[in-house]
Amino acid sequence: MESSEHFAGSDVFDKLTYSFMGLRLIAYTYFFILCFYQAFLEIIKMIKKQSKTTTRFFVFFFQSLFCILRTIQTAFFYDNHQLGIGTANFFFFSLGTAAIFLAWVFIQHYWLLIMYKFFISEEVRLNQAKPINYSTFIFALIIIIYQITVSSITLHKNIETAESVGFLILLLIYASLVLFNGYYLLSHLKKHKKSTPFSHFDVMILKTKILLGTVIFVAVTIIIQELVFNMHYTDTYETPRQYLKLFVVGVIEFIQLLVVMLVLSDGKWKVYVLFQSFKTHNDSSSEMDNSNSNSKGKKNSTFDLGYSSGGNLNSNLNTIEISIENDSLNKSSPSFGNSKSDLIDATLKDQS
């Protein structure tokens, strides 16, 4: 148990913990501003293009939600040094963790759309994307309802063991889904790369590997820390060890946040620092695309994760755009031929 004089065990550790919490508060507030601003820019783009949704919007939105929830959680520390179940600190911590899950739900959504659009079906049809969209939003809704319910119960009842076990099961199931779909996409990208001259696959493969590696790292390290701090040491939240757990989890979370942000910006951190908008293929061709889609009574949804051409200045292609149309697709169009190779090549072809 922590002493009445020193919540972290000693005067030195008390000061270190206060300093850590102060830096944590500043860092999460800063990253909330960066991510929320990019989510706001995505909203502006959607309004201008009359688009329905973008993957980048959802990822930025939920990463910004994660940051603001962590900021609120950290602020509660100055009112109550306890971080365990039954405190407002733990309540907002749990909700923040759910926000990370939701951000990766839409990264997986993007991977699924690419697979079904390019690699799985022989024909491009509207009904291939709809089940993915519905299942993604249903899964996201389940996570939200589950986490709000569990977090609310923890405010009134100590269910630490059940909460830890439930979290580990959810993490294992979701990590397995992401790894399976990501690996499946990666194998098809490598296979198709052999039959296409375009260099864009190198960047797509690299970024998919980075995201997959991040999922593996986060899943393994989170499981280890859960086993150590919640299973092996059952009194973590009654001792100063709770601040060590918070530090370890914070490092893991920041790594995934930075990786996702860098992948989305094609490694250009100054885009965030200078509060700039991403320059993508969707930006350069949106007016033409929207003009065509509006004239045919179609609604366009863009799923964009910043898979760029790897620095080729002569290429206008920075992203893959997947249009979901209400009308039947014109099978005679060269952009939507029956051949998978023709379809991807037409999508990835330099627009200049």
Image (cartoon, grey):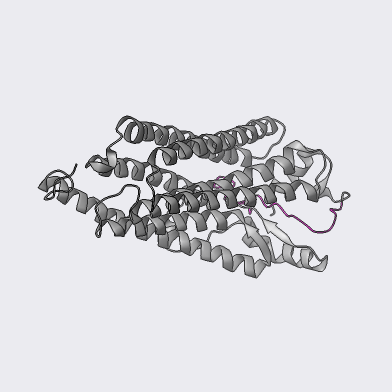
Q: Name the side, left or right, on which 15 lies relative to 37.
A: left
The part of the image, by quadrant, that contains residue 72 is bottom left
- Front-lying residue, 97 or 264: 97
Q: Main secondary structure of the magenta part?
A: loop
Residue found at x 42% / y 33%: 223
For residue 193, side relative to residue 163 (left or right) = right
Quadrant location of the N terminus in the rendered image: top left
Q: Nearer the viewer, residue 42 or 77?
A: 77
The number of numbered badges drawn on the structure is: 0
Q: Residue at x 64, y 61 (%)?
A: 284
Q: Position of residue 29 (x, y in %)?
A: 36, 60
Report the quarter where the C terminus lies. bottom right
| Residue furthest to the front | 157
- Mark yes or no: residue 315 visible: no
98 lies above or below 291: above
Bounds of the magenta segment: 306-330
- Where does residue 306 sit, x and y in percent of width and height? 57, 50
Residue 242 colored in magenta in the image: no
349 vs 219, nearest the viewer: 219
Give residue 26's quadrant in the image. bottom left
Is residue 316 found left or right of 340 in the rendered image? left
Q: Position of residue 78 (x, y in %)?
A: 24, 59
Residue 85 shows in this picture? yes
